[in-house]
Amino acid sequence: MRLGKRQKAKAEIPTCSMADIAFLLIIFFMVTTVFRVEIGLLIELPRATAVQKLPRKNIVHIWINDKEMISIDDMDTPLGSISWPMSQKLMVNPNIIVSMLTDQNASYGVMADVFDELKDAGALKVSLVAKKERGG
């Protein structure tokens, strides 16, 4: 009988199936995780029954270009002073409809600021204009 030192077995972690276990865990969490769906603004669009041509005197055109320059009926206007000319136009003609056309590279923040100033002026009838695509 030997009474010598016993060699201790080294503790090993089997790594052969480690990748399989990791992929199974990934698949399990991908299948069982529920993602919350973002709900946007609910907008009720009016139905167009007939096209009605508006008189030119009732329309005010606002253009916003990509350099954040704002033009009201071909008159350049700084961003902070839109409400005064619009309120003057509304005093003369309360049936004014604002037609707004923005460049596709214009900042959405500038457009939101213009909306705020129009609201302050009392111009609540705003129409967004889309450019017509040419093609056949």
Image (cartoon, grey):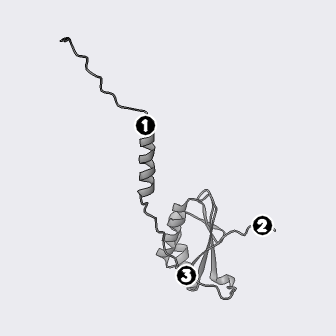
Q: How far across and down, in percent of the image, does residue 17 sit? A: 43, 37
- Residue visible at 63% across and 83% down in the picture: 58
Q: On the picture, is 19 further left or further right than 128? A: left
The residue at 46%/68% (across/down) is: 39
Kindly state the secondary structure of the residue where label 3 is placed: helix
Q: Residue at x 72, y 69 (%)?
A: 132
Q: Residues within 10 Å of mark 2 (few under 14, many from 20)?
A: few
Tell me: 8 left or right of 23.
left
Q: Residues within 10 Å of mark 1 (few under 14, many from 20)?
A: few
Residue 116 image position (x, y, % from top left): 48, 70
Q: Give percent across and percent down for residue 72.
A: 61, 70
Report the Cα–Cα distance between label 2 and label 1: 60 Å
Nearer to the camera, 58 or 22 = 22
**Labels 2 & 3 near each other (Cβ < 8 A):** no
Q: Which residue is mark 1?
A: 17
CB atoms at circles 3 and 1 under 8 Å apart?
Answer: no
